[in-house]
């Protein structure tokens, strides 16, 4: 029970932040077939119950392949894109139609003792995507393969305003009544951009973008994506990454890549500070900046445990409010996870680095070095020549970063007179 209560308390800021937001969620056909699909549906229902406006886009590639094989038809591709002739289109319509009905049925469940109990969801779909043909490229006729021309923004928003979940299939219709086979990634990306969605959530087999060392890449800027695309070549992870970046370039604040195979991956990504997938975002996920008066509460939460242990000198809320301009902070998803302060010592060209603290969960990530660099830059900008630091526990850390042992006698008189001999802090200095 304590773990559940703690999780809920940490999730509450995200619950408030996501309410009334529009999320476009793309689930490929492989994800619909996966054994974890039922859990994903439950998680989508939970998001809907928390006030999130949901647009669900589904894929159908494996289902189309199965129908082609059953009919003895050979699939044809050019540059990774399906060529949809008349016979293939019949398989596409059959696969997409059955999938849409199956998804609507899962979202309509109201079983006792299940996460769906009492949900009473309304699912809406229809001719909400207008498409146009790809045509002939490099001499290859794509027939009924198309691309999104526009998304019915007003129609979808009206359905979302009525608290419906909007379900978009990878089919589009032309003004002349033609049917086109679309890539679900194209539908999801265009829907997110045209709707001005707050998030685009893309499901894939992997937990997110995996780098060349097999590690999860947690965050990227859109301008960093091309280098990864070159490394990945032509695979589905590259398609997801490209879609995420395109959405961000189109005005979507954040795109997320998560795993359809991992139970709870969607909720972990949306309701925890570090997430569980890959985030592609325009703005910085974590930023070093100067503190503002609104940060006082966060600073108290960060430094109070260290004050209790005697590592930091106690500072009351009143002192922090008075001295807030001296502080620099590292902010991560609205939480202050590290801080440091610079005090200019009166009647001298020296300053003191004080109250350097990093949240224990975020140590060993170089944040202390970032703050030290920030404080040194601020000190130089103020014309200071020497930076002092007084510490009881972290002497070696400062020595490794160029601080030399010093003494009370070396301190400017205004600071030496305030030295607390009972704390017996070690003194270090660094020429700037």
Image (spheres, rainbow, N blue to C red):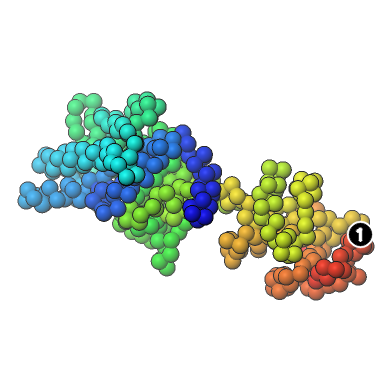
Is residue 201 placed above or below 219 in the rendered structure? above
Q: Nearer the viewer, residue 388 or 78?
A: 388
Is 427 positioned to the left or the right of 373 in the image?
right
Q: Nearer the viewer, residue 418 or 384?
A: 418
Q: Nearer the viewer, residue 347 or 355?
A: 355
Is residue 428 placed above or below 233 in the rendered structure? below
Q: Determine if residue 35 is in view.
A: yes
Which quadrant would the C terminus be assigned to in this image? bottom right
Q: Determine if residue 371 is in view.
A: no
Q: Quadrant of residue 292?
A: top right
Is 228 positioned to the left or the right of 432 in the image?
left
- Count residues near mark 1 (Cα–Cα under 10 Å), then give few for <14, some for 14-19, many for 20+: few
Q: Residue at x 10, y 52 (%)?
A: 69
Q: Residue at x 25, y 30 (%)?
A: 126
Residue 392 percent coordinates (x, y): 76, 69
Q: Residue at x 30, y 53 (%)?
A: 36
In this figure, what is the number of numbered marks?
1
Residue 184 percent coordinates (x, y): 29, 43
Q: Residue furthest toward the left? A: 72
Residue 377 percent coordinates (x, y): 73, 57
Q: Residue at x 59, y 66 (%)?
A: 364
Residue on which the image places disc 1? 414
Is residue 393 placed above or below 316 in the rendered structure? below
Q: Check disc 1 and report its element: helix, strand or loop.
A: helix
Is 243 positioned to the left or the right of 351 in the image?
left
């Amino acid at each position: 029970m304590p773990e559940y209560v703690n999780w809920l308390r940490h999730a509450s800021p995200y619950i408030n932040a996501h309410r009334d937001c529009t999320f476009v969620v793309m689930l490929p056909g492989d994800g619909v077939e996966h054994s974890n699909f039922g859990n994903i549906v439950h998680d989508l229902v939970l998001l809907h119950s928390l006030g999130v406006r949901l647009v669900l886009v589904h894929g159908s590639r494996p289902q189309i392949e199965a129908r082609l094989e059953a009919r003895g038809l050979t699939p044809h591709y050019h540059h990774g894109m399906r060529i949809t002739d008349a016979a293939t289109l019949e398989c596409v319509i059959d696969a997409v139609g059955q999938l849409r009905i199956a998804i609507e049925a899962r979202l309509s469940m109201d079983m006792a003792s299940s996460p769906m109990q009492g949900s009473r969801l309304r699912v809406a779909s229809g001719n909400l995507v207008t498409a146009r043909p790809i045509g002939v490229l490099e001499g290859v006729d794509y027939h009924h393969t198309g691309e999104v021309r526009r998304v019915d923004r007003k129609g979808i928003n009206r359905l979302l305003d009525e608290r419906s979940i909007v379900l978009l299939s990878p089919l589009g219709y032309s003004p002349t009544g033609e049917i086109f086979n679309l890539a679900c990634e194209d539908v999801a990306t265009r829907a997110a951009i045209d709707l001005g969605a707050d998030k685009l959530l893309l499901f894939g087999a992997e937990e997110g973008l995996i780098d060349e060392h097999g590690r999860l890449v947690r965050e990227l800027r859109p301008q960093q994506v091309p280098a990864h695309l070159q490394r990945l070549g032509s695979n589905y992870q590259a398609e997801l990454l490209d879609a995420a970046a395109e959405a961000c370039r189109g005005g979507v604040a954040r795109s997320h890549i998560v795993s359809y195979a991992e139970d709870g991956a969607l909720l972990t990504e949306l309701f925890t500070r570090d997430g569980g997938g890959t985030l592609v975002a325009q703005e910085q996920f974590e930023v070093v900046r100067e503190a503002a008066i609104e940060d006082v509460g966060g600073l108290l939460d960060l430094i109070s445990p260290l004050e209790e242990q005697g590592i930091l000198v106690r500072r009351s809320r009143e002192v922090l409010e008075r001295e807030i301009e001296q502080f620099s902070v590292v902010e991560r998803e609205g939480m202050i996870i590290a801080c440091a302060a610079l005090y200019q010592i009166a009647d001298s060209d020296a300053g003191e680095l004080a109250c350097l603290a990093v949240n224990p969960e975020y140590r060993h990530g170089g944040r202390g070095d970032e703050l030290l660099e920030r404080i040194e830059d601020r000190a130089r900008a103020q014309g200071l020549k020497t930076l002092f630091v007084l510490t009881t526990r972290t002497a070696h850390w400062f020595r490794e970063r160029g601080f030399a042992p010093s003494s009370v006698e070396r301190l400017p008189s205004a600071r030496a007179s305030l030295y607390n001999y009972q704390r017996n802090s070690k003194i270090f200095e660094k020429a700037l």
